[in-house]
Image (tube, rainbow, N blue to C red):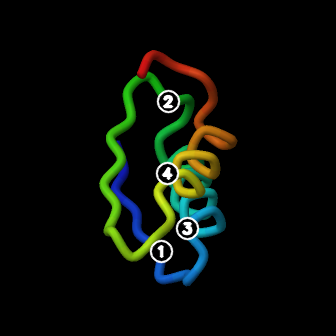
Amino acid sequence: MDVGYSDKGNGYEAAKEVAQRSLEASGESVLAFLFTTDSYEQKEVWKGTKEKVGNGQQ
């Protein structure tokens, strides 16, 4: 289990960074929770997260 955060201004890049660090710390994802702020473009956050975590049930 891992918790991460990013202070990058771009939601896509922030999500990729956090997901990558979490995967490195905990291994392959079985279940992921994503919390974000409304200061990011949410579709870009989802895109960056999905790119790193992979396809799963929504």
The 10 Å Cα crowd at callout 3, few under 14, some 14 to 19, many 20 or more, is many
Amino acid on which disc 2 is placed? Ser
Q: Relative to the observer, which residue lies in front, 35 or 5?
A: 35
Amino acid on which disc 3 is placed? Gly
Q: How many marks?
A: 4
The 10 Å Cα crowd at callout 1, few under 14, some 14 to 19, many 20 or more, is some
Which residue sits at x=55%, y=68%?
A: 11
Which residue sits at x=65%, y=67%?
A: 13
Which residue matches tag 3?
A: 11
Give whichever of discs 4 and 3 has the lower sequence position: 3
**Are the residues flagged by discs 2 and 4 in contact, CB closer than 8 Å?**
yes
Q: Relative to the observer, which residue lies in front, 54 or 42?
A: 42
Give the label, 4 or 3, closer to the camera. Answer: 3
Which residue matches tag 2?
A: 29
Give the CA separation, mark 1 to mark 3.
Answer: 9 Å
Give the label, 2 or 3, closer to the camera. Answer: 3
Give whichever of discs 1 and 2 has the lower sequence position: 1
Give the image quarter of residue 39: bottom left
Report the disc number at residue 22: 4
Give the CA separation, mark 2 to mark 3.
Answer: 20 Å
Give whichever of discs 2 and 4 has the lower sequence position: 4
Q: Relative to the observer, which residue lies in front, 11 or 3?
A: 11
Which residue matches tag 1?
A: 6
Give the image quarter of residue 36: bottom left
Give whichever of discs 1 and 3 has the lower sequence position: 1
**Residue 15 pos. (x, y %):** 55, 59
**Are the residues flagged by discs 2 and 3 in contact, CB closer than 8 Å?**
no
Quarter of the picture containing the N terminus is: top left
